[in-house]
Amino acid sequence: MNKIKSFAKINLFLKVIGKSKNYHNLYSLISQINLFDEISIQETSAKKSKFLFTGPYKIKSEKNTISDLIYLMKKNFLHLKDKNFIVRVKKNIPNGSGLGGASSNAVTVFKYLKKKYKLKISYKESLKLLAKIGKDCPLFIDNKVKLIKSSGVRYVRFHHRLNLKLLIIFPNQFISTKKVFNKLNKFSKISINKKINLTRKPSLINLCKLYKNDLYVPASRISKKIIDLSKMLDKLDTILYYSMTGSGSAFFVICDTKKSLLNVQKMIKKQKKAFWTTIAKTI
């Protein structure tokens, strides 16, 4: 049985620029990274679909983004109406980390079913369908770097790759996205028409330092671990840039060399043994 990779993502910067209806509008640069869950899917003659999660970050809920996706696809595609599936997911991406694992899982299954059953659905309609599962789901439709200019459905795609090596740090604390946004007190007023050049690493890093992540402050009101981790990273002069990703609680660190990243990882493991870390890169 073939396993499909479901990649995580990072927000290199994240600005909350307003709110429309029930969703916040974001201005955020996003790249997928080579940290991934592993998914296998097979058709079953059983009367309902089954979802099996394993791995270090397995979940127990029968209701999840994949079950929501399959329900929606069976409703929208006559060819899938009477089909059921066994979906196995090895969860390597931490939950409640801001790395987008749940959304990525749903989109990965969508792309598999669309290809296998030759479903007739346009790119635009695919994005609309995926947005019903989660507003950030459309971002995983392909591996391109994206600049969000809304709640996730509207974005600019880049053709260049970032080619960044990273250290991912997860303080082993689940943080609710809803709770983080509820703690947000103000919106950022910035121009969203600024040109971004992915090929010039120094200017990109400076832009990220300027914009940072608007959700850091509200997330730090929920988790002291986030404040402690920031204080640790602030002391290291080998770090070019670090930030929390999404609504947290995971952070990423960018250094000039892999050796520097390994040294930061070693320090984190020594001082915070409960924290999970991994070396990764953008894809």
Image (tube, rainbow, N blue to C red):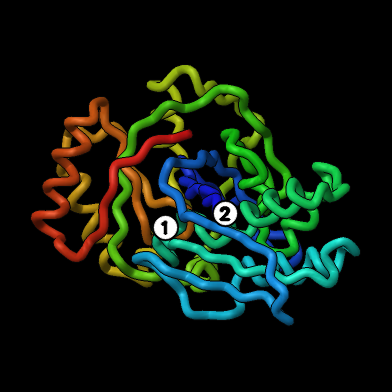
Location of residue 261 (image quadrant): top left
Which percent across, then down, holds residue 271?
10, 57
Viewed as shown, does residue 97 lie left or right of 271?
Answer: right
Q: Earlier in the sequence, mark 1 or mark 2?
A: 1
Name the foreground residue: 88 vs 178: 88
As displayed, is residue 214 above or below residue 155?
Answer: below
Secondary-structure class at tag 1: loop
The tag on residue 2 is none
Q: Which residue lies under the disc numbered 1?
A: 93
Q: Residue lying at the far left in this picture: please name it.
A: 270
Category of crowding for the residue at label 1, using alpha-carbon neighbours closer than 10 angstroms: few (below 14), some (14–19), many (at least 20) = many
The tag on residue 104 is 2
What residue sits 51% from the left and 48% below the top?
5
- Residues at marks 1 and 2 touching, judged by CB atoms closer than 8 Å: yes
Secondary-structure class at tag 2: helix
Q: Quarter of the image containing the N terminus?
A: bottom right
Circle 1: residue type: Ile
Location of residue 51 (image quadrant): bottom right
Q: How many marks?
A: 2
Circle 2: residue type: Ser
What residue sits 43% from the left and 62% below the top?
91
Location of residue 47 (image quadrant): bottom right
Which percent across, then down, holds residue 259?
17, 30
Which percent across, then down, holds residue 60?
48, 79
Category of crowding for the residue at label 2, using alpha-carbon neighbours closer than 10 angstroms: few (below 14), some (14–19), many (at least 20) = many
Name the foreground residue: 105 vs 169: 105
Which percent across, then down, holds residue 282?
44, 35
Mark yes or no: residue 18 visible: no
Mark yes or no: residue 110 visible: yes
As displayed, is residue 215 above or below residue 123?
Answer: below
Q: CA distance from mark 1 to mark 2?
A: 10 Å
